Image: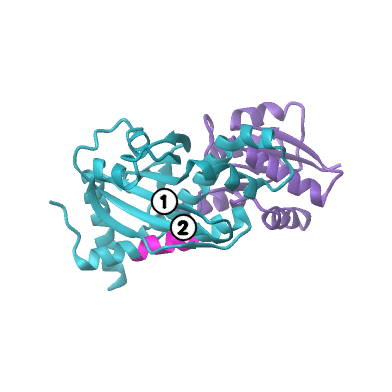
Amino acid sequence: MTTVLVVDDSKVSRLLSKQYILNRHPDWAIAEAASGEEAIDKLQTVTPDLVLLDLNMPGMGGLAAVEKIQAKCPTAHITLLTANVQDATRDKANALGIGFAEKPITEACIDRIIAVFENE
Amino acid sequence: MFQLSELQHDALVEIFNLGVGRAAAAMSRIVGEEVSMSVPMITFQSRAEVAKALGSAEGRRISAVAQHFEGAFHTEAFLMFPEEKSLEIVRLMVGQSLSLEELSEMEQEAMSEIGNIILNSCMGAFANAAGKELRGSLPTYHAGTGDDILGLSGKEWDGVVLTLKIDFNIERHHIYGYVAFLLDMPALQDLQRYIDDYLARLMG
């Protein structure tokens, strides 16, 4: 079964991501975390195949969490899902070898992330 | 008194227009409706005048999301709506699946996320045009009069501030709001430098 970890300090963003993923794949398991630290803790009990990661969160930001997530789950597909649409951020995501998607979270945006993940 | 030349003023409006287009597209995706946005209006005002323009004198209450950006220059960014419209906007965002109680619980947090997306769209376009990076704080939600909102940053806005104001309109729902960026003197000087660099690049 495919497991997705949704990491975002915004509850409404987690709710929307979860809803749109389950619309497409009702059988997928969704785990949630509200910060980078919580996401890393979560990896003790969950092994995600796909990680949707917000950038600007209290405590450890999304980019700082990437390497730790990659170390624990080297096969996980990680996509930065952020309101920060700056070229500098996109470049950092590319350098880390992760995907980049712009908020707002819409069904089309989640579908695109899933399509990239499934075609990997 | 700080002044922008006509060319600098035009360049600033042009750069922010890129952000406005991006913010309008983002807002439209959030609410699933057509959203129109005005050309940015640039004014130099005192803090009191800005608050007055927001209806402080009449006690008009607004719902605002504030975010501080720093890096290439500093600015306090605000997304503002009439307070009574915020629940309607959140409803447009999350759809019909939540009860009114759940919606109310989520209102502040959802508005913060909307502010985060809209303000970052505007600032992102600016950062990209300037070839610089801007770091945004976490968004914070506030409700109150213009005076309450503008006093939030804890700064003494004793001098003139530059206000970049963009009106937007979610047409089918008759929801008007606006985005404002406030810059104090040191920020204006930094901003002026980036505008000059931008113009120099354009002119080769």
Q: Colour of chain A?
A: purple
Q: How packed is label 1: few (under 14 Cα within 10 Å), some, or many (20 or more)?
A: many
Front: mark 2 or 1? 2
Tell me where residue A112 appears, x and y as whole percent: 70, 58
Task: Tell me, yes or no, whether dots 2 and 1 are on the same chain.
Answer: yes
The tag earlier along the polypeptide, 2 or 1, is: 2
Residue A79 shows in the view = no
Q: Which residue is mark 2?
A: B168
Disc 2 is attached to a residue of which chain? Answer: B
Q: Residue furthest bottom?
A: B203
What is the magenta segment's predominant secondary structure?
helix
Q: Position of residue B47 (x, y in %)?
A: 25, 41
Comparing B73 with B93, the one in front is: B93
Q: Secondary structure at mark 2?
A: strand
Q: Amino acid at mark 1?
A: Val
Instruction: Tell me the shade of chain B.
Output: cyan
Residues in magenta, as a range: B14-22
Question: Which residue is rendered at x = 35% and y = 45% of the image?
Answer: B54
A43 on left or right of A24: left
